[in-house]
Amino acid sequence: MKTLTRLVIAASLVASGAAFAESTVMVGGQQMFPSKDIVENAMNSADHTTLVAALKAAGLVDTLKGKGPFTVFAPTNAAFAALPAGTVDTLLKPENKKTLSTVLTYHVVPGRYGMMALSRAIKAGGGKAELKTASGGRLWFMMNGPHNIVVKDEKGGVASISTYDVKQKNGVINVIDKVLLPS
């Protein structure tokens, strides 16, 4: 009986440890698991259905399921909805695949840039960090208060990062409140 009790306790400890081994962040009402890739997690977020549809239309799903690491500055559905009327529908058309791909890869930076890495880069840059995107464009990062980072695009638009450090097996997602636009 003692052996059975010990086995049950050990199994319980292992099971509870496994539950805590993978810390998650809630995005779009769902847990984002570090053991999943960027696309798998984005597909589970109710706040990123437009982004996922755009990734599919642009043919970028396989790329963002790749090894990486990638940092994705992921606009919410509300960010896409704030674009001028008809913009998203126009971008999703097959004839606009190249433009859509450029806009989406402008939201991707090679490497892992969570809050701490961005903060260090901003400090090292004297208050501003510049990162090159996967599309070849540039994004600028600045502090907006002690615990918030904003992203400025090439057209002068500014997005706030609302959720940081959503770790993925192939990178990190930082949720933003605006769609970033290349020049």
Image (tube, rainbow, N blue to C red):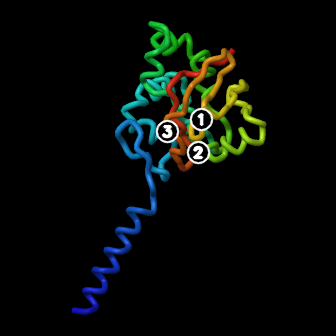
Q: Secondary structure at mark 1?
A: loop
* Residue ID for mark 1: 145
Residue 163: which disc? 3
Residue at 30% x, 80% y is: 9
Q: Position of residue 124 (x, y in %)?
A: 77, 42
Q: Position of residue 116 (x, y in %)?
A: 63, 47
Residue at 42% x, 36% y is: 43
Residue at 38% x, 73% y is: 14
7 is higher (above) or lower (below) than 128: below
Q: Is residue 182 left or right of residue 95?
A: right
Q: Residues within 10 Å of mark 2 (few under 14, many from 20)?
A: many
Q: Position of residue 22 (x, y in %)?
A: 45, 58
Q: Quadrant of residue 13?
A: bottom left
**Spatial separation of the CA atoms under disc 1 and disc 2:** 26 Å
> Image quadrant for the N terminus?
bottom left
Mark 3 or 2: the one toward you? 3
Mark 3 near mark 1, Cβ–Cβ under 8 Å?
Answer: no
**Spatial separation of the CA atoms under disc 3 and disc 2:** 15 Å
Comparing 75 with 7, the one in front is 75
Comparing 20 with 140, the one in front is 140
